[in-house]
Image (spheres, helix red, strand yellow):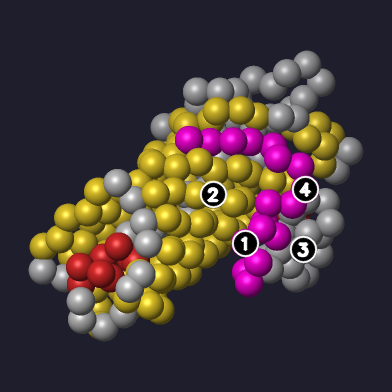
Amino acid sequence: MNRRNFLQAAGVGSTALALTVPARAAAGDRTPEGAPEGQTLFEFLGRSNQDGPNVTHFGFLTHLFGLADDLLFADANVRTEETARFTFLASSALDSRHEHGGIITTSAPGELTLHLNQTPQGDFNDPDSFARGQAIAEFGTRYYNVLNVQAPNQGIATAAVELTLLRASSFALAGQRFRLGRPGLRAHLSATGQGTRTQPDPVRAFYLMGGSAVTG
């Protein structure tokens, strides 16, 4: 296997999803109460598509601190991307890579937008479907990914992502109003998943990822 080529494909490693530490809301808004440092803020499933150094990340939340899990889906009995109300779309570009044997590390800055769609229509064959609805938060992101190459064109990725809230807008859900936080708040995300290279030159690959974010 040409690890030098795959390492760029595998450098994705993270659906750079970001939610923030709950913060004091604007007048008339509510935020989840009492999230101490180290509290799990959210859990998610997603996919990352890579084309050369550029990566598109997209997916949906499966759990969000302070909200009942049922509220995250239009149909509480069918909890998939097709019914998920909270979705994300993000982009990043690799800016470093290091290799030692079958271990490859990469980093990348990027941006992410979190959306609330009251009529969900997520489709993993259509990344833009995860950007529909109201944009409720925008984040700056930086991730560090470790890829463990397992076989030709296959690897296991583990990512650590720094999240910084840039902007947040209030939104309505279940008859109440919420806001995810205030600019400058930070959280840390960890994720793991399977990477598959589909083309060596130019490098193309996809990653199926799952993970969670915590305060602090």
What amino acid is at disc 1?
Pro
Element under label 2?
A: strand
Q: Is residue 199 visible?
A: yes
Q: Earlier in the sequence, mark 4 or mark 1?
A: 1
Which residue is identified by label 3? 121
* Chain-order first, disc 3 or disc 4: 3
The first of marks 3 and 1 along the sequence is 3
Asked whether 167 or 6 is in front, the reply is 6
Cα gap from disc 2 to disc 1, whole angstroms: 10 Å
170 and 215: which is toward the camera: 170
**Circle nearer the viewer, 4 or 1:** 1
Q: Which residues are magenta?
A: 124-140
Task: Say the numbered circle drawn on residue 133.
Answer: 4
Kindly give the residue lying farthest to the top in the view shown: 27
The mark found on residue 127 in the picture is: 1
Earlier in the chain: of badge 2 and badge 1, it is: 2
Q: Position of residue 173 (x, y in %)?
A: 82, 41
Disc 3 to disc 2, how far (Cα)?
17 Å
